[in-house]
Image (cartoon, rainbow, N blue to C red):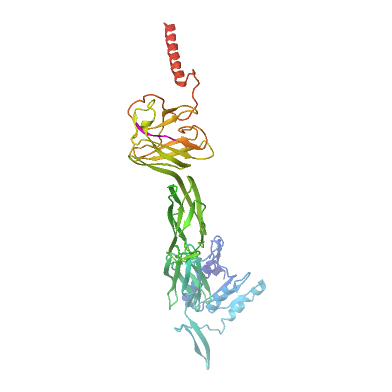
Amino acid sequence: MSDAVQRVWTTDLTGTKLYDAIYKAIEDTRDYVTSSGGVGSVVVVSEGKDENNDIGGPGSEHSRHELIDLAYNNGIRIFTVGVGSVIEGVLKEIAYETGGSYFYAPTPSDLTTVPSAIAAQFYGTYVVFYDTSITNCQDHTLEISVTANTESGVDSESFRTCAQDLDVNPSEINFGSVDTGEIKTTNVTLCNLGIPYLTVDAISAPNEPFSLTTVPPLPATLGQGNCIEFAVTFAPTAPGDFTDNVTITSNDPDEPSFNIPLSGTGISPADISITPLNINFGDVLLGDPKTTNVTITNEGTLDLTVISIAEPVDPFSLSTVPALPAVIASGGSIVFGVTFAPTEAGGFDATVIVASDDQDEPSIGIPLSGTAKSSLTIESPQGPITVATSKGQITNLSLVDVSTLPAEGKPNASFPYGLFSFSIEVGSPFGQIVNIEITLPGNLSTDAQYWKYGPKTAGGPDEWYSIQLGSNDGDNIVTIQVEDGGLGDGDCEQDGSIVDPGGPAITAGAPSGGGGGGGCSMSNPEGQINIGHQLILLGIFALGLLVWRERRRR
């Protein structure tokens, strides 16, 4: 026995390689029996563990069913003795499947009785190994006739033999309808209903949106009644019907390749889409409302219910709103209108709120914006002239005959569209700056100026002066900027009213008199040196200083 122990000794102490040790013992016993004859057997004293302490997995290269098959095919019986914390199922399986016996020795005194018990089984005991082609789990009887000297006898035994039999549950998976972005999982159990060991060699992974999870290490060996489990998931990212298969490969003689059909439908829940998501009406003239249509579309698979569309504040309003709540089928849409109808000039903002049963966006706000302009139009000999402003109300637009105005200070220029006068009532707060847009009957030269006739200072006399044009790019629209009580205001008072007689002029030369640059301002007291005079005097003083310094050098 000492020699036998030494033959299977290993220097690898990282774990318990129980199956490799038994496999080696069977090989040595087989070789011994082959060379010397007799009956071979192996005695295993163990707690039944096969493990690698470093990685927590199997310690042996050989599996349990491999050593059992090797012993069975060579007529070698294995006797197992359980000691310590015994895994009886492993030790009993090894013993019983090879024609041996299992003994349990919880104490050293129990261990001393095992050798004699094993030896007793070799006296007058014959082990019959029986192979059959019947694998359909039907009962059949084996009779054995024994003759010893002059005596004979017959013994019979009933058997039920079954081959490896893979059972798959469920054998087909229909995930049904699953929302896009969601995941549904089904567990699959593989069991061996046969008696011999079943080896599951591979489990093929399906294509997306199906996938496998929690797949055990393969190949996996299953004894009778043993099972393994894995999971199949369905995670659609787009709507549609999907099918595929999971293929199980094993040593089941009837079904070495078993397909599990997979099916599922990806669906999108109600998914609201609104066009446009932002409405800017731009410039709108008073009395000329503007409407924009809004389309609500269901881009999901399930029905979308639009619960409400909240009315915005004035001067915005809703029009042609369908009856609510409104159910929109997949791909369908409804339309409603948003109108901007200002009654006074200025900039306006509001929001339309759309509520629905969309899971991700149950409430969507549509920002609204627009600018209302007050405008008046008058017919001139050259065509219509329109004056508009986004602040205040334009009144009293009229044409002014240039020839009726004094010639003193009048610019040496032509007024291709004449002069016109108008008022803008801006109200409080006083002193506001107003942008004015003038649309002319034709294009205006880019070197044109805007000339006005009126007082430049509070209480001052009427006179000709020019103010700067804003936008003048050669088309028929120009802009000017006027301040209540300041630049360009004909009454020179901060009273919420702007008076603006003037018009664009094409200058032919310097004006015959008067001053440019203007608007209402404070006049200089008589005899006070203005800034221009100060600059001239400063230049003369600097020149004199340079001459004086030059003379001193000489």
Q: Residue furthest top?
A: 554
Q: Nearer the viewer, residue 45 or 32?
A: 45
Q: Which of 126 and 181 is in front in this view?
A: 181
Counting every numbered tag in the picture gives 0
Residue 318 lies, in percent from the top left, at 48, 56
Q: Image height check: is 206 above or below 539?
A: below
Q: Nearer the viewer, residue 129 or 342?
A: 342
Residue 167 lies within the magenta run: no
Residue under the image location 36 percent in, 35 percent down:
418
Q: Image height check: is 361 above or below 94?
A: above
Left or right relative to 262: residue 112: right
Q: Can residue 335 be seen in this view?
A: yes
Q: Residue furthest bottom?
A: 150
Q: Image height check: is 208 above or below 386?
A: below
Q: Which residue lies furthest to the front in this view?
A: 404
- Dividing the picture into quadrants, the one containing residue 54 is bottom right
Q: Image height check: is 126 above or below 2?
A: below
Q: Which of 25 and 410 is in front in this view?
A: 410
Q: Magenta-highlighted stretch: main secondary structure?
A: strand
- In magenta, the rendered stretch is 500-506
Residue 459 lies, in percent from the top left, at 50, 28
- Dividing the picture into quadrants, the one containing residue 15 is bottom right
Left or right relative to 407: residue 356: right
Residue under the image location 57 percent in, 78 percent down:
101
Q: Quadrant of the C terminus?
A: top left
Residue 215 lies, in percent from the top left, at 49, 66
Q: Is residue 216 visible?
A: no
- Dividing the picture into quadrants, the one containing residue 472 is top left
Residue 2 lies, in percent from the top left, at 57, 69
Q: Quadrant of the N terminus?
A: bottom right
